[in-house]
Image (cartoon, helix red, strand yellow):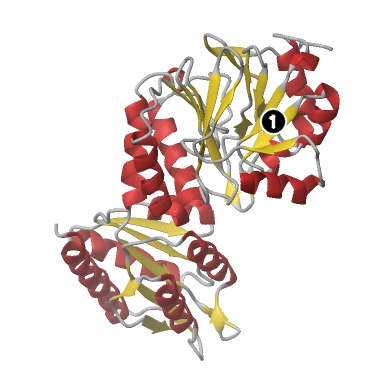
Amino acid sequence: MSSAFRAVQISDRVFWVGAIDWGLRDFHGYATSRGSTYNAYLVLADKVTLIDTVKAPFKGELLSRISSVIEPSRINYIVSNHAEMDHSGCLPDIIEAVNPEKVFASPMGVAALTGHFGPEERLTALKDGETLSLGNMSLSSMETRMLHWPDSMMTFLHEGGVLFSQDGFGMHLATAALFADQNDPSVLQFEGAKYFANILMPMSKIVEKTLSKVGQSGWDIRVIAPDHGPVWRQDLGTMIGWYQTWAAQKPTMKAVVFFDTMWNSTATMARVIGDGLSAAGALPKVMPLSGNHRSDVATELLDAGALVVGTPTINNNMFPTVADTMTYLKGLKPAHKIGAVFGSFGWSGEAPGHVEAALKDMGVTVIEPPLRVKYVPTPSDLDLCRQFGERIGAKLKEHTGT
């Protein structure tokens, strides 16, 4: 088999054998402007073990990287830490090519893989806290249910201190520089936050419990090897600290103002509201949906204290792009936010009320009645918009204790 793609050694007996998806631009509704990686790892123990596989179209790249180290047929075990298709998509083909003795997953992982691909007699459940002997090495499991699927599991290779963290500590970032310390720290922080906001934010409480569970494990973690993005071999506390901060969702003076507009009236309102927020000491992030993706809004909202939404009324409803973003944010369950709504209208004006109800349904504390302007804002209307922003800024100071 060709070894045109080469493995990368990440510790004494562990190699990265994953795939780089340079062209990925959408991950179930999340804009991935820098692509992604699907990470898989080869452990050269007495029982040679493959940790995870890759998305189905990248099977050849996975096998090629494995072949640069060993013959794939020498693999004894496969461990599936996460059954989502970007990590298990080619698993049936790899099982057929490799013919391993056993395939391990969490108990929920066994159920998920069976649901995806049908019964496989070699599927074996690894229970929480169980240690799998690889002969001269050992691999311990930790169930991390709903981080971010019911089947999710982390595994820890004691020899070398490698934590295979599945989607935890990951990010969508296609890079040939495999290690975090080889990449721009500001890019890592941004893409890590974007990943957390769009994938893990609904599970923030579970993240906090998992961080505690990992901390109490007694594992001597020296390498964090996630299923997406770079491998961490230095400054592990940096990524762990980011996760602690992101999971807490402590509100700041940032106010996310997102909106769409039909004839620029709602856009004018948004800009003036943003100026009022700034005058009151807030840090407005004004985000027209014409130039910002829903996942960009979610990313900015992660550490914000306020969410302010603007919409015109169309066909007695909120604008479609606003409805789309509200639906997306509702599923992400942002915490500790105050909110308000504004918008222009022609003859009915129901949309701001619909958004207000959606904010309340999301658990956002709405602090102002909706501000509505008929047709084009007059100078007195714009004065009201500025005052609206100033009042939100003052409430945000109280909310954050600033």
Q: Where in the figure is residue 2, as x and y percent of width and height?
A: 82, 11
Residue 384's quadrant in the figure?
A: bottom left
**What kind of residue is marked 1?**
Thr
Q: Nearer the viewer, residue 60 or 174?
A: 60
Q: Nearer the viewer, residue 397 or 86?
A: 86
- Which residue is labeled 1 in the image? 53
Question: Which residue occupies 31% across, 62% down?
Answer: 336
Would you call the spot at circle 1 few (<14 residues within 10 Å), some (14-19), or many (20 or more)?
many
Quarter containing the N terminus: top right
Question: Which residue occupies 26% across, 74% down?
Answer: 388
Q: Where in the figure is residue 330, as x and y percent of width and height?
A: 49, 66
Among all residues in the image, which is located at the extreme left?
402
Question: Which residue occupies 36% across, 61% down?
Answer: 335
Quarter containing the C terminus: bottom left
Residue 276's quadrant in the figure?
A: bottom left
Question: Which residue occupies 83% across, 31% down?
Answer: 93
Q: Nearer the viewer, residue 97 or 374?
A: 97
- Note whether residue 90 is visible: no
Q: State left or right for residue 320 relative to residue 53.
A: left
Q: Where in the figure is residue 255, as x and y percent of width and height?
A: 31, 59
